């Protein structure tokens, strides 16, 4: 039985499109890297170190208010599909779940809060990766939540800290604050007006960088870009958070301007592109995930421009998650070949868009949902 059978929507409150600029910003994430005193970390950590760290987290997590009622997923105890679901929901990294099908290391785990949009990765690159993940552009809110968790957990567990270098981390680029903040933005206007390269180049000049949907090492799909800080040493958490927020707001303004340019200079072409994307999603019998993301990009643009008024951003956010391979297999109750996965994905999208685009928390692929002739 899957670890998510009884909690099918665990960790998905960041999809609700409730934050600022939710039509452009899917989510904001703030992560803190921490290590514990008295235990080797990074490449030097051995099994006994990792298991000791996990034991201390198990012992003290319940004493932290933000983790009250949380669920701990021990990676080696999970089946491969459950681990991939954690990855697809952005609650765990590729390294933690086991890259390229490898078994996860002993002592690795994820703690998911039952009350707040918080989770803790245990024994990834560092002993602890504290993370908040919220809807829309809410950098300050996300940081406040994870900062409170950091303070509460730090009272229970002794962090490795140096008076000159700050919090000690496995990678030197994370030392100091240990903070990585990122905003997942949808930028089709800048891509279509061919202004995206200029904007991305400017990010590097102000100390920020960009990645794909799943973070470092992942490709950009569906015109989604993760914008995040590059350095953590020599600046305060407040400075890093405020700087990211200011720059992202400028990027959003550039994107909004680009969308107006599209409507003014290429309105008919833009509208045709949006409706073609919607039509393909509405009637396709087979969709790869990459194809789905590219089509959803057009539809999401249409919703933002009020050309598809029946659809909600929340609906599109849900489609992105529940059409990923592990989620489709979870619904089917079995492994799916690539072609079967593509057919199940298309069937689910047709059902959701056919119900006037309004998806509820219970609208996820069901085990009896089969594509025609499957």
Image: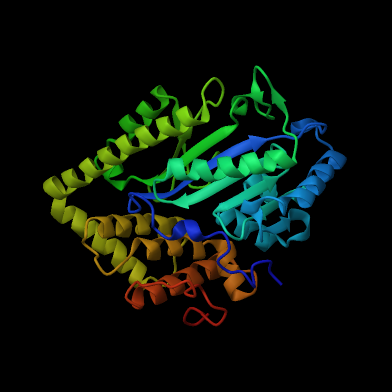
| Relative image position of residue 151 (x, y in whole percent) | 63, 39
**Location of the N terminus (image quadrant):** bottom right
* Residue 152 appears in the figure: yes
Extreme right residue here?
48
Residue plotted at (38% across, 57% down): 18
Extreme left residue here?
264
User: Residue 147 or 202: which is nearer the viewer?
Assistant: 147
* Residue 106 appears in the figure: no
Q: How is the image coloured?
A: rainbow
Q: Where, by quadrant of the figure, is residue 11 drawn?
A: bottom right
Residue plotted at (30% across, 35% down): 250
| Relative image position of residue 262 (x, y in whole percent) | 18, 47
User: Residue 240 or 196: which is nearer the viewer?
Assistant: 240
Q: Is residue 98 above or below residue 230?
A: below
Query: Horizontally, is 66 left or right of 372 in the view?
Result: right
User: Residue 310 or 292: which is nearer the viewer?
Assistant: 310
Q: Is residue 299 above or below residue 331?
A: above
Residue plotted at (40% across, 74% down): 352
How many numbered tags mark residues here? Answer: 0
| Relative image position of residue 123 (x, y in whole percent) | 73, 42
| Relative image position of residue 172 (x, y in whole percent) | 64, 24
Residue plotted at (31% across, 67% down): 311
Q: Where, by quadrant of the figure, is residue 200 drawn?
A: top left
């Amino acid at each position: 039985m899957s670890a998510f059978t009884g909690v099918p929507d665990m960790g998905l409150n960041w999809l609700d499109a409730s934050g600022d600029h939710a039509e452009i910003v899917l989510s904001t994430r703030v992560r803190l890297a921490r290590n514990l005193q008295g235990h080797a970390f990074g490449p030097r950590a051995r099994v006994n170190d990792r298991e000791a760290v996990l034991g201390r987290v198990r012992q003290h997590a319940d004493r932290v208010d933000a983790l009250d009622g949380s669920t701990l997923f021990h990676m080696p105890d999970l089946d491969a599909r459950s681990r991939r679901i954690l990855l697809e929901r952005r609650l765990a990294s590729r390294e933690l779940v086991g890259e390229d099908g490898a078994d996860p290391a002993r002592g690795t785990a994820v703690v998911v809060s039952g009350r707040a949009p918080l989770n803790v990765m245990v024994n990834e690159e560092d002993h602890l990766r504290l993370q908040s993940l919220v809807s829309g552009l809410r950098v300050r809110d996300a940081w406040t939540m994870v900062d409170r968790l950091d303070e509460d957990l730090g009272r229970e567990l002794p962090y490795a800290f140096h008076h000159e270098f700050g919090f000690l981390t496995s990678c030197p680029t994370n030392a100091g604050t240990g903070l990585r903040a990122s905003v997942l933005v949808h930028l089709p206007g800048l891509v279509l007006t061919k202004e995206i390269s200029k904007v991305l180049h400017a990010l590097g000049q102000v100390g920020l960088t960009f990645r794909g949907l799943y973070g470092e090492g992942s490709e950009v799909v569906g015109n989604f870009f993760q914008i995040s800080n590059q350095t953590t040493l020599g600046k305060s958490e407040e400075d890093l958070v405020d700087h990211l927020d200011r720059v992202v707001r400028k990027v959003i303004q550039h994107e909004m301007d680009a969308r107006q340019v599209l409507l003014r200079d290429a309105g008919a072409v833009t509208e045709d592109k949006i409706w073609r994307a919607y039509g393909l999603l509405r009637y396709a019998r087979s969709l790869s995930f990459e194809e789905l993301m590219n089509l959803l990009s057009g539809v999401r643009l249409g919703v933002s421009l009020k050309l598809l008024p029946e659809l909600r951003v929340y609906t599109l956010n849900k489609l992105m998650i529940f059409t990923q391979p592990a989620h489709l297999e979870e619904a089917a109750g079995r492994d799916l070949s690539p072609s079967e996965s593509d057919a199940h994905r298309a069937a689910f999208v047709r059902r959701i868009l056919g119900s006037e685009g309004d998806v509820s928390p219970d609208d996820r692929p069901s085990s009896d949902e089969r594509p025609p002739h499957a």
